Amino acid sequence: MRVGIEIGRVQTEVAEQAKWAEDAGFDQVCTGEHLFFHGPTPNSFITLAAAAGATSGIRLLSALAIVPVYPLAILAKLVASLDQVSNGRFDFGVGVGGEYPPEFEAAGVDVRHRGARTDEALELLGSLLSGEKVTHSGRFTELPGVALQPPAIQRPTPPIWVGGRKPASTRRAGRFADVWMPYLCTPEQLAKGLVDANAEAVRVGRPDGSVSGAIFAWSAIHADGAHARERAIHVVSETYQQDFTPMADRYLIAGDPDQVLARLRQYHEAGAEHVVIATAAGSARERLEMATLFAAEVVPAVRDW
């Protein structure tokens, strides 16, 4: 099992955080994004470009880029450029958003079209990122015989991770993705979703098993497991503007190291080959303390799973 950790909540510390994560033994650094949200949020491409410049081997994951707010030509250029500047270390995590409709309005995009826009983008991205000349006249995109240069380094494209937790996300993963990565998801839901994603892959002519599993996990770790659970509930409740107490034991990974490992084992047995840790911490100091404990107690333990 491979472990990534979220960075980028403090933009001025991205390079330092990424270098620390690489030295600490994490497999990926990851960042999400919003144009506008309830609080400060990064842009995944800019943040990961800064992380790329500070590191040499760790992989970089957008977790998740909100695809439908971008014109496709600009999105493809950003993906290819980030793969270039990172020397082929970028994993392109795709989301449709919708949690905060005002950002769609601000971008001039109808939030009701977010799924269809994402599907059209993913239909075309493979050809664009490989440097092929593309002509397309579609519902949302016009490409008048253009070729993206330089293309992405990775072939045929950077790995595509589709996020989400609804049936539309498993269908999208089956059609386009290498990895399906739900969030706020139980091990049982992960296992079922992977079956559905790979059934869709087969339906569209891809090999069975084309889609592997990951989990985006809001997580807290502390020597005192009860304290970790309390911190996770508090931070995630603030983030999503709702009380997560009734959902904590289903969706959050929180506890002492043994409790965290036991829960991660359940996700691994359900099909997760990757976990992205979003530390449920309220301060930079608390995030560093949790990340240090994850690096010491979790990353080495799960590596051979």
Image (cartoon, rainbow, N blue to C red):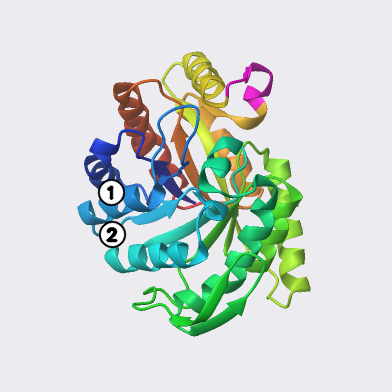
Tag 1 residue: 22
Query: Quarter-wise, where is residue 296 in the image?
Result: top left
Q: Is residue 220 left or right of residue 68?
A: left
Residue 69, given in percent of the width and then of the height, sits at 53, 51
Residue 76, given in percent of the width and then of the height, sits at 45, 67
Using the image, determine if residue 146 lies above or below residue 100: below
- Using the rendered image of the protein, determine whether residue 194 is visible from the camera's viewpoint: no
Around disc 1, counting alpha carbons within 10 Å, would you say few (fewer than 14), some (14 to 19), or many (20 or more)? some
Contact between labelled residues 2 and 1, with CB atoms less than 8 Å apart: yes
Q: Is residue 89 left or right of residue 212?
A: left
Number of labelled discs? 2
Of residues 25 and 189, the one nearer the viewer is 189
Q: Residue at x 54, y 58 (%)?
A: 161
Residue 220, given in percent of the width and then of the height, sits at 47, 26
Does the segment drawn in magenta span residue 243?
Answer: yes
- Using the rendered image of the protein, determine whether residue 185 is visible from the camera's viewpoint: yes
Of residues 18 and 110, the one nearer the viewer is 110
Amino acid bearing label 2:
Gly
Amino acid bearing label 1:
Glu
Q: Residue at x 48, y 76 (%)?
A: 128
Residue 119, given in percent of the width and then of the height, sits at 65, 63
Using the image, determine if residue 152 lies above or below residue 91: below
Tell me which segment is drawn in magenta. 241-249
Using the image, determine if residue 21 lies above or below residue 240: below
Around disc 2, counting alpha carbons within 10 Å, would you say few (fewer than 14), some (14 to 19), or many (20 or more)? some
Q: Which mark is residue 57?
A: 2
Q: Residue at x 53, y 74 (%)?
A: 126
Does the segment drawn in magenta span residue 213?
Answer: no
Q: Which mark is residue 297?
A: none
Ranked by sequence position, the earlier of labels 1 and 2 is 1
Using the image, determine if residue 184 lies above or below residue 272: above
